[in-house]
Image: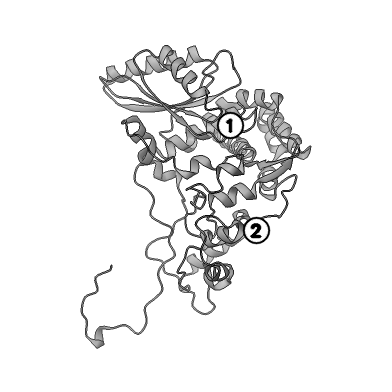
Amino acid sequence: MNVFGIKIGHRNTSQQTERTPSPSPQASPLPPGRAGRLQRQNALSPNIRYNARSTPSTPDRARASSLHGGAGSSSPACSSEAASPSRGFTRQAGRRENAQLAQFHDTMRASPKMSRNDPIPETPPETPARLQQKMDAIDLPKLKSLDKDLYHYAQTATELVNENNGSNAVLTRMDKKMLPLIAEAENARHPGLNLHVFKGADECYKAIREQNKQVWSSKQPMNMRVVFPPSKGMPDHQVALDVQFRPGHRPSVVCFESGQSDLMEINKMAIEHGLKGAKVKMVGNLIQASHWDCAMYALNNALKSFKHHDEYTARVHSGETDLSLPAEFLKHAQPRSLIRGSPNENDIVSKDKGGLHAETLMHRNLAYRAQRFKKAYSTSIEGFRFQEIQRAGDYLAAQRGRK
């Protein structure tokens, strides 16, 4: 819908080593819980050490602050130092201690994700480089050999970008048609996600009631995620549900709305009517400004509710209020005004939380910003669509390879 310290033991001199290796450049510890597997998966062994110069401030924050002057900006000196090669994760000649780490470093630098370090254009282009990169990763001939519907879906999305257009009614119908395949691919990638897609509200509520009966019978708690249209009058509008089942308890439902705020109460009443007795809570992640991207926003909310289950969604289920929405829920915000000046603008939203590929929320919004229809807005959700198309293609290719 539209919405505009460390304790050091005493040692004598003979016990002191001649030099102390610099700390290992590992990523920040992953958060606890099963959602941790969605975080960065290329962390290094704790036994690997790499001699690099120390970095007193976080380079990615300094870089983003120097580009757009966010609220969390560093001092000018810090910003200029962050741009210097000596401030980052820099290899030093003659001091390499581990071939595996050197190879990892080279791989990181060769990754397309290094484009996150590119400067932000002064004027938003028609097609941002980051969106073009996502689009170029789609292998149309390969998709055509795997699934004709997925191929036409990717082809349509590509043509709209090349024509400097956003989503439209045709692509929206394709979004809904391909959601079951995308959900299947995401379930294969993330065991425990348990994502389901329903064409209508009645079908959704029936499935939730049946699942609740099974949980009571088996006495085994579980969670499921849902993408569905809550209103019969707006079949194109989709929302995400995170449903918690516990034996002996009513279902607990957290609904994520990305569109208009006035839909929050309407959706809540509809869900409470369809699932009588269920505990329903609403979360307004109101980052959508387009008419046609509801399915993609709902899918993104479902994935994020799973990824941040322990730190956020489970706490909403338990009744906690006044919780701050994790910044990663805001990655695909279309209006810049929602991010600039917000408490989250300098939060890291990439899987890499402290290395070469780290990126802040504000930097991402600006990097995906495009000029269309006399307006400028972030096209990050379109990049997300291409990502899901690619994942669906990879899933189909893997399935075919097993036959």
Image-quadrant location for residue 297: top right
Residue that appears at 54% across and 19% down:
229
Q: Secondary structure at mark 1?
A: helix
Image x and y of residue 309, in percent: 39, 37
Would you name the residue on which mark 2 appears?
Answer: 118
Callout 1 amino acid: Met
Q: Secondary structure at mark 2?
A: loop
Residue that appears at 47% across and 66% down:
57
Residue that appears at 54% across and 73% down:
86
Judge by depth and name the residue closer to the eye, 339 or 235.
339
Per the model, the C-alpha gap separating discs 1 and 2 is 27 Å
Image x and y of residue 144, in percent: 71, 32
Image x and y of residue 290, in percent: 64, 31
Image-quadrant location for residue 401: top right
Q: Which mark is residue 43?
A: none
Q: Is residue 233 above or below residue 97?
A: above
Left or right, 111 with respect to 218, comes to right
Would you name the residue on which mark 1 appears?
Answer: 296
Judge by depth and name the residue closer to the eye, 232 or 306.
232
Callout 2 amino acid: Asp
